[in-house]
Image (tube, rainbow, N blue to C red):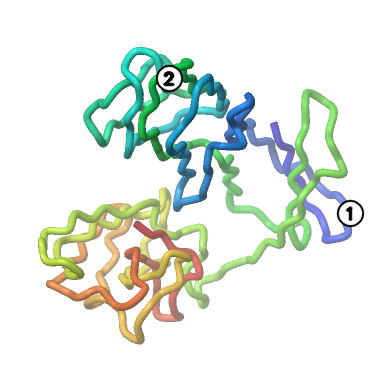
Amino acid sequence: HYNVYWSSASHMRGQHLGSIPASGYMMPKCTGPTCSQINVSAIDGGRVFSRDDYEDNENAIIKASGPATIKVTRFETESYYDVLRLGSQSLSGVPPIPTKVELPEGPLTITWFSDDSIHGGGWAFELSQMGATAEFQVKATVPQGPGLEVVPAYGKNELLEAGVFVEVADYDSKMPPSPGFAPASLNFVDLDNSTGVIAGVVEVIPAHGAPAGTITYYQLDFADAAGKPLGAAPLGPRAEANGSRSVPIRVAATRLPPGASKLMVRAGNSFGLSSGWVCA
């Protein structure tokens, strides 16, 4: 678990505020003689693993944690003898693509092996893990210091040198909404089949406990892969907030600007836009 304390930047610790259970998240780790030949790259929300034009007698084991989703985007191996095992599901030969596998919470294992004869074109899959973060909600309270220190712990023992300090901003009613009130998520299905053009309805899911009045509208923008908003004007009119209820934002047929790869939504009020955002 993690212990949370009021603290100063110099680690002068104050009152214990609470604890956060550890999520059990484990980054993917590959072991075996073939690991150096498996290409790994980062994508938004996960990683891509691929092995092209594989050889005889390959063997690799990737261990990580769930819950997770694996999307197999390319697969061609010798049937029955060259196998990619995703948890309890095995793939071999030329299965339907794309194939999606949902893995439950807890440790997960991905195993690859080939025999000593016929080869295939190889495989590629995307691994998206959940549970990489642990959250702690600070209830309404008088600040006891300029920030919080989060310290990893096991039982009563703390790893003090690994503590992390974060400054706390006390947002009030004369400021833009806190980043903590960034929308929980957004949903969008493109209804325009034209290349480079989108249209449809964006559904904004407010943050849990977002107070009425603090957020008065949501603004929709295009964003690049890094989450940087694009364009001088928002994508359509600002949508009026409705407390904890979802908010629809209608998108007329619009051409994607150069570099756009995401839709971004930010909360706002009469004092400006929040620095928190969500993309999809």
Q: Quadrant of the C terminus?
A: bottom left
Q: Which numbered circle lies on residue 174? A: none
The residue closer to the viewer here, 97 or 148, is 97
Figure check: 257 above or below 106: below
Which residue corresponds to mark 2? 85
Q: In which quarter of the image is the N terminus?
A: top right
Instruction: Indicate the amino acid at tag 2.
Output: Arg
Return the residue found at the far front: 117
Residue at 71% in and 57% down: 166
Instruction: Indicate the amino acid at tag 1.
Output: Met
Residue at 25% in and 73% down: 256
Q: Callout 2: 10 Å neighbours few (<14), some, many (20+)?
A: some
Residue 217 shows in the view: no
Q: Which numbered circle lies on residue 12? A: 1
**Horizontal arrangement in the rendering, residue 73 relative to residue 45 (left or right):** left
Residue 33 falls in which quadrant of the image? top right
Evaluate if marks 1 and 2 touch, with contact meaning CB atoms under 8 Å apart. Answer: no
Instruction: Name the secondary structure under disc 2.
Output: strand
**Horizontal arrangement in the rendering, residue 22 relative to residue 115 (left or right):** right
CA gap, disc 1 and disc 2? 50 Å
- The x, y position of residue 277, in whole percent, is 44, 63
Residue at 17% in and 58% down: 190
**Horizontal arrangement in the rendering, residue 59 relative to residue 193 (left or right):** right
The residue closer to the viewer here, 194 or 250, is 194
**Horizontal arrangement in the rendering, residue 160 relative to residue 204 (left or right):** right
